[in-house]
Image (cartoon, rainbow, N blue to C red):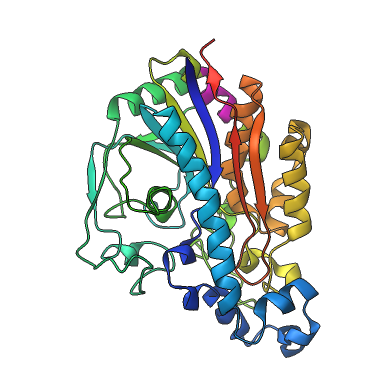
Amino acid sequence: MSEVLLAGVTHYPPLSMPDSLMADILRRTLADPSIPQLEKDPARWPQHMHDEWGHDEGLASAAVHRAALVAGLGRVREELDAFQPDLVLIWGDDQHENFHEDLIPPYAVLAYDDLTVLPWAQAAASAMTAGKANVWDEPPTQERLIKGHRTAARWLVEELIGEGFDVAYAYRQLHHPGLSHAFLNTVLYLDYERTGFPWPVVAMPVNCYGRKVVGARGFMTRLDEHPEPDPPSPSPSRLMALGGAIMRAAQRSPWRIAMIASSSWSHAFLCDHTWRLRPDTDADRNLYDALVAADYTKWESVSLDDVERAGQQEVLNWCILLGAARAAHAEVSWSTFIETSCFNSNKVFALWNPIERT
């Protein structure tokens, strides 16, 4: 019987908004007076970006981008439905949402019980979506039950400590009244058709934003703003080692576990060498090719300097996923790379063949 399922998805916040708002990050960047006006001229942009922006500031392209993302999410949801996990472990970033200046763990396990959240009323505590319409036309009073699995979360913490990873844990929220958007959006998007998400969730936040998590609040600044850098994130190699430890624990567990890395890849607003106008697609393609080829050495050799230059901070979530896949000798069964220039970040979806109990 299959016991572990590995997947990668995106929690891209503008997917929850109408198409007309999907290019808002680029619009905000174009309003930054510290970026040279010449660089903002669409006539100077790469052809793909110029075409995607079009004559309607990306409105028609937004519908195309949404369709591709929804298709990728649907493919992963089909696998979850077939696998029927006992719990879903999600790796995601916390962008100064639940963790603030009083505590920034490198990674943590949220051992929550069932949690009733208000996705739109609580959006002020999450990136980007505060006060904006959502594509499902759900009201601020809309509630959502996120099932928890405290027993499995506590077990995972104990297993990781035994493996030499002194992981932090929490039984209740610190600053965010619900769940940080990396986790909540993952659930909302994997239930895009609103048929329900019946599986308990264990959230494992990772300090992906490192040097920008407090000073930049894990989000956008003007190009000429230079907040004092915070201490760095865990390295890709350390996170891959963590993923291996989690996989070994999962294979010893009594549960069927789906493990999901949730993030987009290079983010334009983190990418100074593109004037923050578009993501570093070459860097993303390089990692994607290595993912498909199971070239773990390439992933492990990436430095934090490489990650930060390419705006790939959130890909650190995928380093845990790749470490888990390496430990299980898992094989990619399906993947897709969704390229964009105008919608802030390239997106990748991936599935690995389900892993049998050892």
Quadrant in the rendering for residue 222: bottom right
Q: Residue at x 28, y 47 (%)?
A: 173
Dominant secondary structure, magenta: helix
Image position of 134 with respect to 333: above or below: below
Where is residue 3 shown, x and y percent of the image?
47, 19
Where is residue 7 shown, x and y percent of the image?
54, 37
Q: Residue at x 49, y 16 (%)?
A: 251
Quadrant in the rendering for residue 118: bottom left
The residue segment tinted magenta is 241-248
Image position of 227 with respect to 261: above or below: below
Where is residue 157 shown, x and y percent of the image?
40, 26
Is residue 243 within the magenta segment? yes
Is residue 249 within the magenta segment? no
Number of marks in the image?
Answer: 0
Is there any visible trace of residue 35 in the rendered image?
Answer: yes
Left or right, 273 with reference to 88: right
The residue lying furthest to the left in this view is 141
Image position of 213 with respect to 304: above or below: below
Quadrant in the rendering for residue 154: top left
Q: Residue at x 49, y 47 (%)?
A: 74
Tell which of 21 and 94 is nearer to you: 21
Q: Residue at x 51, y 59 (%)?
A: 12
Tell which of 46 and 63 is nearer to you: 63
Left or right, 33 with reference to 145: right
Quadrant of the image for the C terminus? Answer: top right
Where is residue 214 shown, x and y percent of the image?
48, 60
